[in-house]
Image (cartoon, helix red, strand yellow):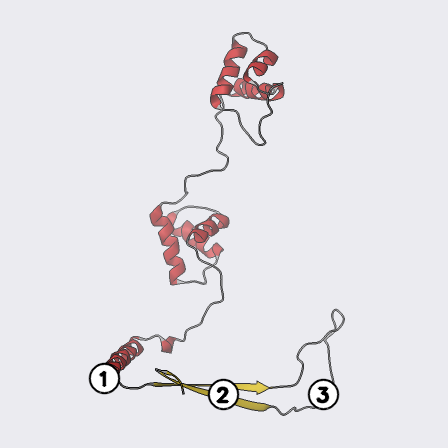
């Protein structure tokens, strides 16, 4: 009994050609398949495709490495668009690709390219325009230069920070039936304490 072909396995083009040559020489399908260790039903399918197309149908690639749709420069262009505007959606990127590169590819293909960038989808941090100006960059540069000079002179720096806490003894979550808002009777105003915590740290440790 011929060994069973592994699941999703394919016979090589050479094996298929040997089967077709044997049938053309007058051998029976059963004997040819038995010699080449091919299932008879599979042998009939191979020969039927040969008769319909007039030639041997090559194996199509399944899995493994596949040629990329885009060149390296085109992939880098997609990365540049994302770096310039991190809020671009896959549909918007697809539109840019179609407009600039004249290529109509799926959103899943673009997502695969982005996955290769090692980019993740996360919450956007909003930066005010006033906090990112050339004048502010110059001020920060001057401060860094002054700070470095003071450290060389042996000056002592103290870092001070403050944080506030508001202690509220009112529960904000509760259980209720589906579609019903949980409610609880409570005084209109519950006074709470505002606690301020301050800490200072010098170069050698906490103060």
What element does badge 3 sit on?
loop
Q: Which mark is residue 101?
A: none
Q: Are marks 1 and 3 in contact (CB under 8 Å)?
A: no
Determine crowd level at label 1: few under 14, some 14-19, many 20+ residues with C-alpha closer than 10 A: few
Q: Which of 78 and 29 is in front in this view?
A: 29
Q: Residue 197 carries which label?
A: 2
Q: Name which quarter of the figure residue 194 lies in.
A: bottom right
| Distance of label 1 from label 3 (alpha carbons) | 60 Å
What element does badge 1 sit on?
loop
Q: Name which quarter of the figure residue 171 lies in.
A: bottom right
Q: Is residue 123 left or right of residue 85?
A: right
For residue 156, above or below residue 99: below
Q: Which of 20 and 152 is in front in this view?
A: 152
What element does badge 2 sit on?
strand
Instruction: Nearest to the eye among marks 2 and 1: give it.
Output: 1
Q: Give the residue at mark 3.
A: 186
Q: Which of 4 and 32 is in front in this view?
A: 4
Residue 30: image x %, image y %? 61, 13
Q: Which residue is drawn at 49% across and 88% down?
A: 197
Q: Name which quarter of the figure residue 34 lies in.
A: top right
Quarter in which the C terminus is drawn: bottom left
Q: Are marks 2 and 1 in contact (CB under 8 Å)?
A: no
Q: Which residue is drawn at 49% across and 17% down?
A: 17
Residue 4: image x %, image y %? 60, 25
Determine crowd level at label 3: few under 14, some 14-19, many 20+ residues with C-alpha closer than 10 A: few
Q: Give the residue at mark 1.
A: 153
Residue 156: image x %, image y %? 30, 86
| Distance of label 3 from label 2 (alpha carbons) | 29 Å
């Amino acid at each position: 009994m011929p060994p069973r072909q592994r699941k999703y396995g394919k016979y090589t083009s050479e094996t298929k050609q040997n089967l077709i040559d044997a049938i053309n020489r007058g051998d029976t399908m059963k004997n040819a398949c038995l010699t080449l260790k091919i299932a008879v039903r599979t042998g009939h399918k191979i020969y039927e495709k040969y008769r319909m197309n007039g030639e041997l149908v090559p194996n199509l690639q399944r899995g493994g490495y596949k040629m990329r749709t885009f060149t390296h420069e085109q992939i880098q262009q997609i990365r540049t668009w994302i770096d310039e505007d991190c809020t671009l959606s896959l549909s918007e990127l697809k539109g840019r690709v179609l407009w600039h590169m004249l290529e109509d590819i799926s959103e899943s293909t673009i997502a695969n390219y982005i996955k290769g960038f090692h980019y993740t989808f996360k919450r956007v941090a909003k930066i005010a325009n006033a906090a990112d100006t050339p004048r502010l960059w110059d001020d920060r540069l001057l401060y860094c230069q002054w700070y470095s000079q003071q450290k060389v002179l042996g000056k002592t720096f103290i870092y001070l920070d403050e944080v506030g806490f508001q202690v509220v003894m009112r529960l904000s979550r509760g259980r209720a039936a589906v579609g019903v808002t949980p409610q609880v009777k409570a005084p209109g105003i519950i006074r709470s304490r505002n606690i301020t915590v301050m800490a200072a740290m010098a170069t050698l440790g906490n103060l």
